[in-house]
Amino acid sequence: MCDEAISQLTFTDQGLIPAVVQDAASGEVLMVAWMNAESLATTVRTGKTHFWSRSRRKFWMKGESSGHTQTVVSISTDCDKDVVLIRVDQAGGACHTGYRSCFSWHLRGDRWVEDGQKVFDPKQVYGE
């Protein structure tokens, strides 16, 4: 993806675009994060996912702390060009809580039940 292709995307007023990250082999949705033009261009250039943290106000690479990186297989956009879908090969867990996917909470009646595959201990990876 070149600068011209990135310029054709529709970013929010804050210069961001949502990125849905999906396991390329299983189709499982692993996470949703935000990207700006720089993080998307870096993702394309390096083949590893990079995002923009709205809460920390910083650029970050997935796995920079945990080692649980995402290797890009493909990047797509929707018909409105306001969301990107990034298919990846996931190393370790995608969720900072230790689960393979951030979508490990499932609605059961009137409550959310944690029901995912835990693949690492976040206290060991990130500390207390």
Image (cartoon, helix red, strand yellow):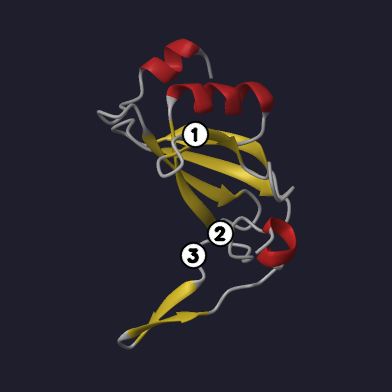
- Return the x and y of residue 75 as percentages of the image width and height: 53, 33
Residue at x-position 67% and y-position 45%: 63
Q: How many marks?
A: 3
Q: Earlier in the sequence, mark 1 or mark 2?
A: 2
Q: Tell me: residue 39, above or below residue 96.
A: above
| Secondary structure at numbered mark 1 | strand
Q: Is residue 71 left or right of residue 29?
A: right
Q: Tell me: residue 124, above or below residue 116.
A: above
Given the image, on which type of amino acid does mark 2 rest?
A: Glu
Residue at x-position 58% and y-position 43%: 87
Query: Badge 2 local density, few (<14 within 10 Å), some, or many (20+)?
Result: some
Residue 58 is tagged as 1
The residue to which callout 2 is attached is 28
Q: Tell me: residue 92, above or below residue 115.
A: above
Residue 103 is tagged as 3
Given the image, on which type of amino acid does mark 3 rest?
A: Phe
Residue at x-position 69% and y-position 60%: 127
Closest to the observer, 13 or 11? 13
- Return the x and y of residue 64 as percentages of the image width and height: 68, 41
Q: CA distance from mark 3 to mark 2?
A: 9 Å
Query: Badge 3 local density, few (<14 within 10 Å), some, or many (20+)?
Result: some
Query: Badge 1 local density, few (<14 within 10 Å), some, or many (20+)?
Result: few
Q: Quadrant of residue 84?
A: top left
Q: From the image, state whether disc 1 or disc 2 is nearer to you.
A: 1
Residue farthest front in this picture? 128
Q: CA distance from mark 1 to mark 2?
A: 27 Å
- Return the x and y of residue 122 as percentages of the image width and height: 67, 64
